[in-house]
Image (spheres, rainbow, N blue to C red):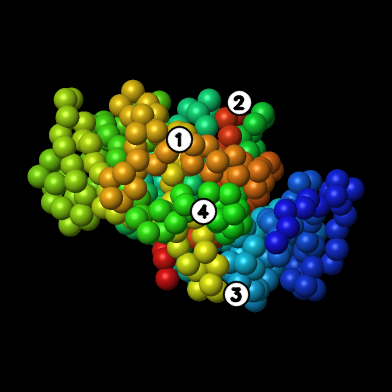
């Protein structure tokens, strides 16, 4: 597979999409710096007329949703641009068109602070705008994770705020060539994550969700019971903060089509899990307790950065991300930015 880029002149070049219908016409749109592997990454579908009756969009989606899901599994991301979507309820209805089982945020073990808008739509990580959220597979640092994610740009940022996207199957291939011993250790040993959760929400941190909210517990006894079932180790610290360590989790997954993916949160944890309680570089290690070297992480970060496509949001955009194929993150930004999200349960 290659990592060549779409030529700059193709930025405004459009071609009739095989997904187009008479009632709701779309084109496949080329974006600057899209990547070409065995397929286009990301795949971008643009509606030709944003003022069209939304009903025709939902009819089109009902007809084409299975094709789109297959394309998203292959490419990793499908971006819908120019669709007649304006609100969280529009986004909710759009998701319904795929007929997928929702994964509610309250059922997750994610450590990010988020707010629900509807039963299945919530705000993206509410860390301060200046905070970078580094590449990760959603909730891969826990035993339970979604299979897909939907993102909706309610308000595009004034400056910055792109969502970096990285194909983890391509990253796996690159790591196999450059640091095969590290990748073999990931395969053979798995990884563990350790972090300290606050007793109350810490809105200054990208990992600021309280242990009560994270574990769905109203007391230390309930929290310990949940951790015991999940196979975590834990320790109560001063200020009723809670240090937890996961059981051994896979760092690599094999997909149904045979592709291998670098499925974990190592980059995000190493680069970004630092706040007044935590140090990112000390939050990860192999499943046998041995250290993950800074040198191997530096190579992994460099390779993933090379493979990253920055999604520059436009208001109304929806991105369907296959969580097993693609890592995502968030660039710092200025001004107002509102990105909503929804998760899909694993099959």
The picture places residue 173, in percent across and down from the top left corner, at: 59, 58
3 and 4 marks in contact (CB < 8 Å): no
Q: On the image, numbered disc 1 is attached to which residue?
A: 294
Give the residue at the far left of this rendering. Answer: 221
Give the residue at the far front of this rendering. Answer: 181
Between discs 3 and 2, the one toward the N terminus: 3
Whole-angstrom CA distance, mark 2 to mark 1, is 31 Å
The picture places residue 156, in percent across and down from the top left corner, at: 64, 38
Determine which of the numbered discs, if any, sits on residue 180 in the image: 4
Label 3 element class = helix
Residue displayed at 41% across by 59% down: 187
Between discs 2 and 1, the one toward the N terminus: 1
Whole-angstrom CA distance, mark 2 to mark 4, is 40 Å
Q: On the image, numbered disc 3 is attached to which residue?
A: 66
| Left or right side of 57 for 48 | right
Between discs 2 and 4, the one toward the N terminus: 4
- For residue 154, say whether it is visible: no
Q: On the image, numbered disc 2 is attached to which residue?
A: 334
Compared with residue 70, is residue 8 higher up or lower down, i.e. above or below? above
């Amino acid at each position: 597979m290659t990592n060549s880029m779409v030529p700059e002149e193709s930025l405004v070049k459009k071609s009739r999409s095989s997904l187009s219908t008479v009632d709701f016409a779309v084109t496949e749109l080329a974006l600057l710096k899209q990547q070409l592997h065995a397929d286009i990454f990301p795949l971008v579908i643009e509606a030709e007329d944003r003022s069209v009756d939304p009903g025709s969009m939902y009819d089109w989606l009902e007809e084409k949703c299975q094709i789109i899901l297959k394309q998203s599994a292959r490419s990793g991301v499908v971006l819908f641009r120019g669709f007649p979507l304006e609100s969280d309820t529009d986004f909710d209805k759009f998701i319904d068109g795929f007929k997928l089982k929702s994964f509610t945020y309250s059922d997750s073990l994610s450590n990010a602070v988020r707010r629900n808008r509807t039963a299945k739509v919530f705000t993206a990580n509410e860390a301060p705008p200046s905070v970078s959220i580094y590449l990760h597979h959603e909730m891969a640092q826990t035993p339970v994770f979604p299979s897909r994610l939907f993102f909706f740009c309610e308000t595009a940022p004034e400056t910055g705020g792109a969502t970096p996207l990285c194909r983890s199957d391509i990253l796996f291939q690159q790591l196999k060539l450059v640091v095969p011993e590290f990748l073999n250790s990931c395969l053979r040993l798995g990884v563990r994550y350790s972090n300290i959760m606050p007793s109350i929400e810490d809105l200054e941190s990208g990992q600021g969700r309280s242990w009560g909210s994270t574990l769905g517990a109203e007391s230390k006894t309930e929290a310990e019971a949940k951790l015991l079932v999940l196979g975590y180790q834990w320790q109560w610290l001063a200020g009723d903060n809670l240090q937890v360590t996961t059981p051994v989790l896979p760092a690599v997954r094999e997909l149904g089509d045979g592709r291998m993916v670098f499925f974990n949160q190592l980059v995000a944890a190493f680069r970004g899990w630092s706040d007044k309680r935590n140090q990112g570089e000390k939050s990860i290690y192999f499943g046998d307790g041995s250290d993950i070297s800074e040198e191997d992480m530096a190579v992994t970060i460099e390779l993933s950065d090379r493979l990253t496509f920055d999604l520059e949001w436009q208001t109304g955009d929806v991105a369907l991300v296959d969580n097993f194929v693609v890592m995502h993150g968030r660039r710092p930004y200025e001004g107002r930015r509102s990105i909503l999200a929804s998760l899909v349960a694993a099959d």
